[in-house]
Amino acid sequence: MSVGILGCGYVGLALARQLADDHEVVGVRRSEAGLAAVEETGAEAVQADVTDAGALDAVPDVDALVFAASSGGRDAEAARRVYVEGLRTAIEEFGARDDSPDRLVYTSSTGVYGDHDGDWVDEETPLEPTTKKTTVLAEAERIAREEAPEHGIDGAVARFAGLYGPDRYRLERYLEGPVTEGYLNMIHRADAAGVVRFMLTETDAELLLAVDDEPVDKWAFADWLADECGVERPPKRTKAERLDDDLSEAARRRILTSKRCSNDRLRELGYEFEYPTYRAGYRDAIEAYRSRQ
């Protein structure tokens, strides 16, 4: 199978490495600076902007597409330009080819759920995005699942929880604190890529929640991390205390958003995690931290 990864960045590079031995992989980056990293995975590197249909002509025909592009900015307009307009451009451009892809996997975020006051959510839970950016992500999911089939492409969504892994452990953030109360829903980069690989090669599921086995209370996580690193436990703050700060409306909504994400469907389909919980996923980071002390 040939796979085109549009936005071969943090997760895309890990996916390329997982696929490279058995499949033909094309990794697409917006800037020339990222092409060397794509080539190091064993994939073919192509420079193209997903929002430019003409630029996508440089990407060869593939059997499957993964849309994992970054918006390059945190605001909603940047997100819309890439996730909505770019995704639609890619679907139309590849769908019009004589040899169009059979499948598309769009990588979304659990932010589309909104606030559930700490309750569990899964693939059947209605979406309630609370920010302009998560509203854009929900619209992109609709495009992937509804508009891609109109162009002869089977559209699917992998909905990622919080990504962590090499270069994104953020140990100091939790070790130094203060840590605001709430739940963490996480997935290691290797498993985020693994879920996408699973959706390309082992299941035709239209939607999967990509999250590990154990959502964790932030205070409990910070204390566990401190104990494992051999340092004092960090100071804590309640949501009410944090909301007393001068925050943007989007930041306030993020703090007030609470949920626990279930991976039951993913497990039932047979996906096996490399890092089932944060305890395994943070082990390398903890050992590296202790070795520096």
Image (cartoon, rainbow, N blue to C red):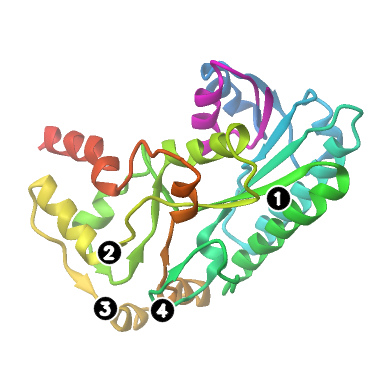
Q: Quadrant of residue 263?
A: bottom left
Q: Which mark is residue 218?
A: 2
Q: Give the mark nearest the N terminus, 3 or 4.
A: 4
Q: Residue at x 77, y 35 (%)?
A: 102
What's the residue type where badge 1 is placed?
Answer: Val
Disc 4 or disc 2, which is closer to the eye? 4
Q: Is residue 284 above or below residue 148?
A: above
What's the residue type where badge 2 is placed?
Answer: Lys
Q: Residues within 10 Å of mark 4 (few under 14, many from 20)?
A: few
16 is within the stretch colored magenta: yes
The residue pinned by badge 3 equals 238
Q: Give the mark nearest the N terminus, 2 or 3.
A: 2
Please, what secondary structure does the residue beneath circle 1 have?
Answer: helix
The residue pinned by badge 1 equals 82
Q: Which mark is residue 117?
A: 4
Please, what secondary structure does the residue beneath circle 4 have?
Answer: loop
CA distance separating discs 2 and 3? 11 Å
Residue 14 percent coordinates (x, y): 49, 31
What's the residue type where badge 4 is placed?
Answer: Asp
Q: Residue at x 57, y 58 (%)?
A: 74
Disc 2 or disc 3, which is closer to the eye? 2
Q: Could you say which is closer to the camera, residue 184 or residue 38?
A: 184
